[in-house]
Amino acid sequence: MASADDLMKKMVSLCKRLGFVFQSGEIYGGLQSAWDYGPLGVELKKNIESSWWDFMVRRRADVVGVDTAIITHPDVWRASGHVDNFHDPLVDCRKCRARFRADQVEGTKCPECGGELTEPRDFGLMFRTMMGAVEDEAAEVYLRPETCQSIFVNFRNIVTSSRQTLPFGIAQIGKAFRNEITARNFVFRSREFEQMEMEYFCRPADADRFFEYWKEERMSWYLSLGLKPASLRFRDHAKEELAHYARACTDIEYAFPFATGGFGELEGIANRADYDLSAHMRVSGQDLEFIDQVANEKVVPWVVETSGGIGRTILAVLLDAYYEDIVDGRERVTLRLSPALAPVKAAVLPLSRNLEAGAAEVAGMLRPILPVSFDVTGSIGKRYRRMDEIGTPFCVTYDFESANDRSVTIRERDTLEQVRVGIDNLADLLCDCLRKGWRPAVEKAGLAAAGRASE
Ligand code: GAP
């Protein structure tokens, strides 16, 4: 297996070579810390987003979703405390001019050239821009540095329109922007990224209970993506580490190979109390209290927030799935992605070019049901390996018998086991494999999985 440093290098190169992630603006030398998702990356990302949305919104009666504007009213960030507090301490090297976050360098010397560092000063992390034709202070707006503030700002609209009653949550997936001083470690820390956030509004007395509840729920979602339990852990924030809005915060961390201490943040679960709603009430002058018609009382709800990053989840999923072994005397790289996340669910591969027409028919039959790839070029062994490398769980081989016996062979990515199945039953069996897993689905179909496929 690859060492930690090695693994990261291999992952960055695999992502580019296979079309998961590219550096943005690469032909112009690349825009540092901005990343583009390629054809496979965008599918993986959509699968993660839809898993989150199902888990957090669709399968629950007590959470609704929103999708709000990225460009936000400047008062939102004055009220939220970001204009005053959302800074990182910046130090410059007097010799080579490199810039660092003061809390990420040890001592007073530049880690790159040994030069002397300046005293730390505050560096605002929000991206500012101008809206409209006149570029003056009144036109100044911000790109949101977190998606949740628009949830708080819309609180009354949502309560009124969706008739929710406490406790309930509002969820959103969307872009956020931070002018990070040092953006690094691939998509782990970038200046443009996506968040999956949910704000759960409850009575103040229930906040501790829901904080514990959401910690467990969120961990169970990461496990449902197929991440290994040993790669994940909780980490409670110490009091002095808490963000300006938080009473308590626990991170869910993943064993990122580059992380100091072996683990890095995937998501934060925070008890934000009534910080945000009260701040927006103060600055806007609007009443954002919740009116409980049954108890006949008014309350400013407290909030338990779950806030995760899509880029970090994608990176964790890819790293966790990366697997090397030797098959038929040759090295093989596999992404052991959970079938639900795999960008391609099945590949249809004719054994020879002469079989292309029959195999294309099978692929055409599957395409309305599953994301399918069809590949005719190269030896069958090479085509299997390419599919293993992008995490495709099932390869369907159309061979010289297929036209006669109306059957094909399915090869499973991790066990390399195979079954022969009638073309008419193929779609049902593949769907069952995706839902229930390979062995249970094959057994249920009354088929016998033969040993490892030879390539
Ligand atoms: N609303 C709370 C909030 O934004 P945060 O801990 O600053 O909290 C939440 O961010 C999540 O967003 C992080 O756990 C991480 O997954 C993701 N995130 C934050 N900054 C990021 C960056 N520069 N690049 C990529 N992901 C980032």
Image (cartoon, helix red, strand yellow):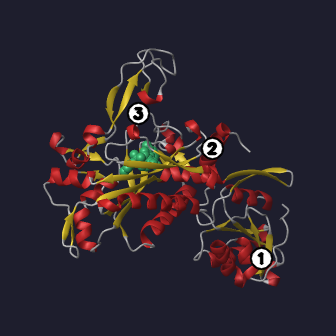
Q: Quadrant of the N terminus?
A: top right
Circle 2 Cα neighbour tier, 10 Å, few/some/many (<14 / 14–19 / ≥20): some
At label 2, the amino acid type is Ser
Work out whether 388 lies above or below 364.
Answer: above
Foreground tag (3 vs 1): 3
In the image, 338 versus 207, the foreground residue is 207
Q: Residue at x 50, y 36 (%)?
A: 29
State the image coordinates of residue 111 (x, y, percent, origin top left).
Answer: 51, 22
Mark 3 lies on a secondary structure that is loop
Residue visible at 51% across and 17% down in the picture: 113
Residue furthest to the front: 205
Looking at the image, the residue that sits furthest to the left is: 285
Secondary structure, mark 1, is strand
10 Å crowding of disc 1: few (<14), some (14-19), many (20+): many
Which residue, given by chain and number where applicable, does mark 1 sit on? 408
- Identify the residue position indicated by label 2 in the image: 13
Q: Residue at x 63, y 43 (%)?
A: 13
- Which disc, if any, is residue 181? 3
Q: Amino acid at mark 1?
A: Val
Q: Secondary structure at mark 2?
A: helix
In the image, is 283 to the left or to the right of 31? left
